[in-house]
Image (tube, helix red, strand yellow):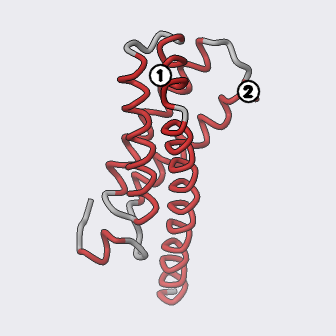
Amino acid sequence: MQNILNALVAQSDWAILTLRIVLGVIFLAHGVRKAKSFSAVAGWFGGIGLKPGAFWAGLAMAAELLGGFFILIGFWTAPAALALAIVMVVAAITNLRAKKSFFQFLELDLILLASLLLLATLGSGFFSLNNLLGINL
């Protein structure tokens, strides 16, 4: 029985690594996209009621870039995942207020939110910078 439990624990570290890579790449890509068209994004944020738009766009961009990078390398994973979870809650509320259908962004918002909360709960896993440095967050 112990061998089975050890095998399951070993597999969970690979699953956490996979989740970290996927989420890290997704949020890095979104952060880079915001950085490349920052003035347009800031205008859009202001237009949907998040004023001042440049402040909130900058905060979202920083969270996505730093949070995505930290999640990718497994450094301060739980705090980064929680910060990005807040971004996803705001995104979901914004899409609900805009009366977008479930299949129009909301399902993506919810799966990313659930994945971030799962990662915040599970932590960085074995294959992470936190583990290498002995950081338990």
Given residues 132 and 52, the one toward you in this image is: 52
Q: Secondary structure at mark 1?
A: helix
Instruction: Give left or right: position of 99 versus 41.
Output: right
Q: Amino acid at mark 2?
A: Gln
Image location of residue 109, percent across then percent down? 60, 34
Location of residue 58 with respect to 121 vertically, above or below: above
Q: Amino acid at mark 1?
A: Ala
Graded by Cα atoms within 10 Å as few (under 14), some (14 to 19) or many (20 or more), the crowding at tag 1 reads many
Q: Earlier in the sequence, mark 1 or mark 2?
A: 1
Location of residue 114 with respect to 101 vertically, above or below: below
Image location of residue 90, percent across then percent down? 48, 25
Distance between mark 1 and mark 2 Cα atoms: 22 Å
Contact between labelled residues 2 and 1, with CB atoms less than 8 Å apart: no
Q: Seen from this angle, which residue lies furthest bottom?
A: 3
Location of residue 107 with respect to 13 vertically, above or below: above
Specify the label residue 42 is tagged with: 1
Image location of residue 34, percent across then percent down? 52, 36
Q: Secondary structure at mark 2?
A: helix
The answer to which image quadrant residue 129 occupies is bottom left
The answer to which image quadrant residue 137 occupies is bottom left
Q: Residue at x 61, y 17 (%)?
A: 96
Q: Residue at x 43, y 27 (%)?
A: 57
Instruction: Give left or right: position of 27 versus 67.
Output: right
- To which residue does mark 2 refer? 104
Instruction: Give left or right: position of 52 versus 21.
Output: left
Q: Residue at x 67, y 12 (%)?
A: 99
